[in-house]
Image (cartoon, rainbow, N blue to C red):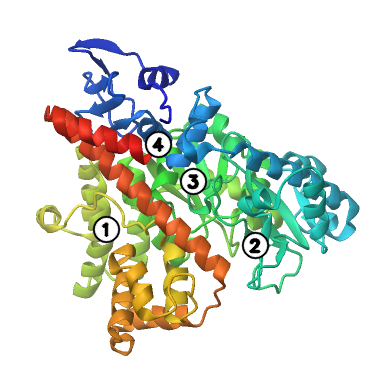
Amino acid sequence: MPKKPDIVQVLESYDISLRDDGGGRLRALCPFPAHEDKSPSFKVWPDKGTFYCFGCGLGGDAIGFVKIMEGVGNRTALRILYTKGFDVEGIKPWKSLKILYEANKYASRLFSYYLEQGKIAKDYLKDKRKFSEDTIKRFLMGYAPKDGEKVISQLRKEGFTDDTLYRTSLLSKEEGGKSYPFFSDRIIFPLFDHYGRIAGFTGRSLKDDDEAKYVNSRNTEIFEKRNFLYALNFAGKNIRKTGDVVVGEGYTDAISAHQSGIDNFISLCSASFTKQQVQTISKYANKVIIATDADEAGIKAIKTSYSALKKHGLVVKVAVLPGSYNDPDETIRKGGLELLLDSIKNAKDFFDFSLDLALSKHNKETRDGRIEIANIILPLINVSKNYIEKAEEIRVLCKKANFREGDVLEALEHEKPREEYIELPESFSEERVLLGAIIQKKADNIGKTKKETTETIPVSFFTYPQHKRIYQAFIEGKLNRLEKDDEKTMVYLSMQQYNPESVSIALNRVEEVQKIRARKKLEEEIIIADREGDSEKLLKLLQKWRWED
């Protein structure tokens, strides 16, 4: 039977002071950032290996604790426990992950070597991107040669198997089964986890007209792009020191910022925050300053994440980039560091920024304009759990928009608070690949006929509502009767290219996410059974838990 880390030892590794609570139970102040516990409501059952907080309602086992505390998934939690010295070798998700980091580390050395051999790539980094030699070395930048097989061949000579190279995404397969290097003729930026280990890579094309300017490692056992925070390994210490984090969107934004001395800068490498990214950031910072050019898409992305950021007690500010500069990197290179520093220094609270923006776009003297302003601002006010903050925001809104306080308070009563922002399911991209391949009838590895496919994958297999609707219409032969938005997505998916390898990877990923969800549900049932004192049910659930490991 797989060995689980001792929950008391895990909690003590986080400097949590446990006290006897009687009945074989321990207690402590809740350690989770989102819960300001003033009396010990965090309870631990050492014999069962579980915990539960009666204040915030979170509970689970040792691994579940790390997941909540660090804001990570199951695999990452296991790796964190491993790095803390806990014996988790017997737990299946950790097996052989160390070799993946070793393969990436050696590949990075090869990429660095080829960068020194190639003038064009080095000149691009130094002359066009304005990166110094020290910066290039610090961020371990490299170059994947046109003949990417050179790197793969050397990795094989060092003893890394093709299976390992597939698992790291350094090697890929064509539709016919022939393998090929994932990266070739690209500038390489290693992607470090917050421990400084290389979890994956991104490759930047040297051709500005290349449709795929950046190509990232596929999601692997040690890398998941959607939850990744670039440069956190460099910035973490300084973020904790100042309590502030400056957030950009691209890899080069973070590199340019660090080169210029802005050492609390990280990048999302996506438009908006995911739940796990927010949880991770909240462990380091009190204030999030988002550096943006304030275009419509960027503001919409911030607004989507605003509820989650505020829920974790974070102050959210917006540093609007000056002039026509699109990102922090361009601002530094073309406008100068002082311009970026000024925008960060003068960053506006997101509420104030949103209100000023709404007032500039909509006429507060007209009925329609006032409705639009209210639609934009009231949800932001309702996000706040702090009464004083909420009262101040209402005061500012009434003063600037000439609203009556009584009307605002009444409107807020009817405005449903947004406890959590709507987030795409973890397997969103993979679900799309599966759905597109099924629509195109290129999913033979799932089923050669519609009947075989639907027997393998029921409608409930998909978690995103739109995917469910499209798949249901496919089963019923009603794709021509879809609503406009669903039809648009269906047409887009039917025009993409899919190969057996990508379909298999997507299928495995969706199944993996479903197992994680089932596991989480089981953890919740265990906590409830323990809380209700149902020993018989608790024993059955714990046995099921162990078997599923």
Label 3 sits on a secondary structure element that is loop
State which mark lies toward you, 4 or 3. Answer: 4
Tell me how far mark 4 sits from mark 3, CA to CA: 35 Å
Question: Does 486 appear above or below 18?
Answer: below
Q: Considering only order in the chain, which callout, 2 or 1, is on the residue closer to the N terminus?
A: 2
Amino acid, disc 2:
Tyr
- The residue singled out by tag 4 in the image is 67
Residue under label 2, please give it: 214
Q: Is residue 402 left or right of residue 140?
A: left
Report which quarter residue 24 is drawn in. Answer: top left
Q: Which residue is mark 1?
A: 377
> Would you call the spot at circle 3 few (<14 residues within 10 Å), some (14-19), or many (20 or more)?
few
Which comes before the other along the chain, label 4 or label 3? 4
Q: Circle 4 — which element? A: helix
Q: Percent position (x, y) of residue 310?
A: 33, 44
The quadrant the C terminus occupies is: top left
Q: Which residue is mark 3?
A: 346
Q: Residues within 10 Å of mark 1 (few under 14, many from 20)?
A: some
Q: Is residue 335 left or right of residue 244?
A: right
